[in-house]
Image: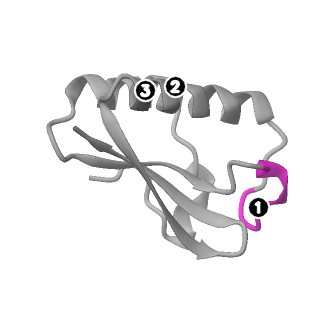
């Protein structure tokens, strides 16, 4: 299950909110999958589609996702679509 439609028509929703991620963590079942970010988390201002200068927002989501990984709630996966274009996913354990 992906809450983010990664087709070109809806690229304005490349990053989910912290609240949406936390809701997914609380309600998802084992093996559920979600795309929580599409772009280049290392430097979101240079990603080719929907670049953002809001680094704080990206880092807060990054930390929340990493914290769920450390708590052994998810496995983290990424898929490369092109240069500076990655799909970041979490799979519920």
Write the residue at 18% across / 47% down.
31
Task: Give the x, y percent position of residue 19.
Answer: 46, 23
Q: Earlier in the sequence, mark 2 or mark 3?
A: 2
Task: Give the x, y percent position of residue 91.
Answer: 30, 46
Dividing the picture into quadrants, the one containing residue 46 is bottom right
Q: Is residue 51 shown left or right of residue 89?
A: right
Q: What element carries label 1?
A: loop
Q: Is mark 3 on a helix, strand or loop?
A: helix
Q: Name the residue under label 3.
A: 70
Q: Mark 1 points at which residue?
A: 47
Image quadrant in which the C terminus is located: top left
Q: Mark number for residue 64? A: 2
Q: Does the magenta stretch include residue 49?
A: yes
Q: Is residue 36 magenta?
A: no
Q: Give the range drawn in magenta.
A: 43-50
- Which of 88/18 is in front? 88
Dividing the picture into quadrants, the one containing residue 60 is top right
- Which of 10/14 is in front? 14
Q: Residue furthest bottom?
A: 82
Task: Give the x, y percent position of residue 34.
Answer: 35, 48
Task: Give the x, y percent position of residue 69.
Answer: 41, 32
Q: Nearer the observer, disc 2 or disc 3? A: 3
Per the picture, the main secondary structure of the magenta-coloured stretch is loop
Q: Is residue 91 above or below residue 58?
A: below
């Amino acid at each position: 299950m992906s809450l983010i439609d990664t087709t070109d028509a809806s690229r304005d929703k490349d990053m989910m909110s912290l609240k949406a991620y936390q809701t997914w963590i609380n309600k998802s079942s084992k093996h559920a999958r979600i795309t929580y970010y599409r772009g280049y988390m290392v430097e979101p201002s240079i990603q080719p589609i929907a670049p953002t200068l809001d680094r704080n927002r990206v880092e807060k989501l990054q930390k929340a996702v990493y914290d769920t990984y450390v708590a052994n709630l998810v496995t983290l996966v990424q898929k490369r679509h092109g240069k500076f274009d990655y799909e970041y996913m979490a799979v519920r354990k």
